[in-house]
Image (tube, helix red, strand yellow):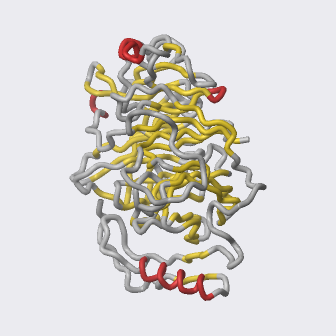
Amino acid sequence: MRRPDTKTSAEPRPTIRSRPTLRALAAALAGALLLLPLAGCMGDPRSETIVIPGTEDEGPAGEAGSGTPFQVKTIYPLPVAEKYKLPVLGWAAGDALVGYFAAGDAPEVSSTFGLQRLDPPYERPKPLAGAMNLDAEYGALSPDGKTIAGFAKAANGIGLALFPLDGGQVKQVSEAARKQRPLYSRTLQWSGNGRYLSYLVYGEARGELRVAVYDEKSGKLGHLPLAGLQDSGGEATVVLSDDGSGALIEDGKTIAMAKREGGGFKVLYDHPSGIGPGVWVDDERFAFLGADGTLFQYDGRSGELSVLLEKVAYFSLSPDRKAIAYTRNDPDDVSVYAGKLQGNNVLSQSAVFQGVIPFQMAWSPSGSALLIDGGKPYASTAQETAPSAVAGDGRRQTFVIRFR
């Protein structure tokens, strides 16, 4: 993605604010060098303040002690159908799961069931009414676990469709033929509160992109202009804030924050990104993984870019944005860690599982359980400081960790 050229000579260089420790100062200097103007696909240089949290008496993850809020109570292996890329779509009410599961002691039966619901203790899946023939592997499950959004054939092309998992009638979101636009995104994203569904489409002008926004409350779909961002020849995802005023756009290399201006969105900030999309913490702040493995939090009100954690490979925030699960970017450390997100700090960090490289991590709606879908590492020298991989013959490991 590339933004139109603009004059930047009058813009100030990034400033740094840090706590007075030598370690923090060194990290701040390194962060400033990484964030100097880059010839990226989304951005020109802007002024930003980098906040490096932490004190010298804070210990590394896994040393939180017996008082940690993340003490593992039970680990439930899941009977997934491994032929699917991501067999678990997500969580439903009551800490149930929606996905493609094997049926008890007859795994081969799962191919005839399609999507199923798996309630605690996650042993006997139940077919979902109305979802017998639904191929939703690439669909998006709503945060309440009641609806899958996907693209489906319509009378005038490919359109947005909503599939209720209670067996209700499928809702085809219609739009006039003149508004049919080629898709730029291949996946859909729900806002955290489940009100907005969004994806990117091509605009009318060459290189122009628009944000397609479906409002669950009004039942209307609109295509809003996106200023400051152009087609880079790839694809990207877009997720809206709960109030619909902000949009996070990520293409695997760069993340951009856009805000509502007039009748569309305008990009106000961008940064080189790592694996995985950004996550809205509230309507103004979002967390994202930088290209160097640093987990940042950006505040659109103050322009502050805070460092939450370093050397992170993957992360997931709980629905209430108070807990975080993450893995380290270290081949000798294949543990999953959990901690409390408080302001610009991650507290009470501890290792909760060891011996798996996650493809997917997702907190339950209650925040008391964590879904992990991943694979066994080929080799590891990490010490046994947390529960290790669950039993199984295959390399895939899919399970639920329930905390005390």
Quarter holding residue 162? top left
Task: Please indicate whether residue 65 sits to the left or right of residue 329 in the image.
Answer: right
Q: Viewer-proximal residue, 70 or 12? A: 70
Residue 44, image x and y in percent? Answer: 37, 73
Does the rendering let one see residue 220? yes
Nearer-the-camera pick, 233 or 213: 233
Residue 378 as seen in the image, left or right of residue 240: left
* Quarter of the image where one finds residue 346: bottom right
User: Which residue: 44% across, 50% down?
Assistant: 264
Report the residue at 44% width, 42% height from top: 374
329 left or right, relative to 253: right
Q: Position of residue 208 (x, y in %)?
A: 28, 52
Q: Residue at x 29, y 72 (%)?
A: 5
Pinpoint residue 22: horizontal percent, then vertical percent. 61, 88
Is residue 133 visible to us here? no
* Residue 270 sits above or below residue 119 on the image: below
**Residue 273 higher or lower than 109, as above or below:** below
- Above or below residue 302? Residue 185 is above
Residue shown at 71%/61% (left/top)?
A: 64
Name the quadrant containing residue 84. Answer: top left
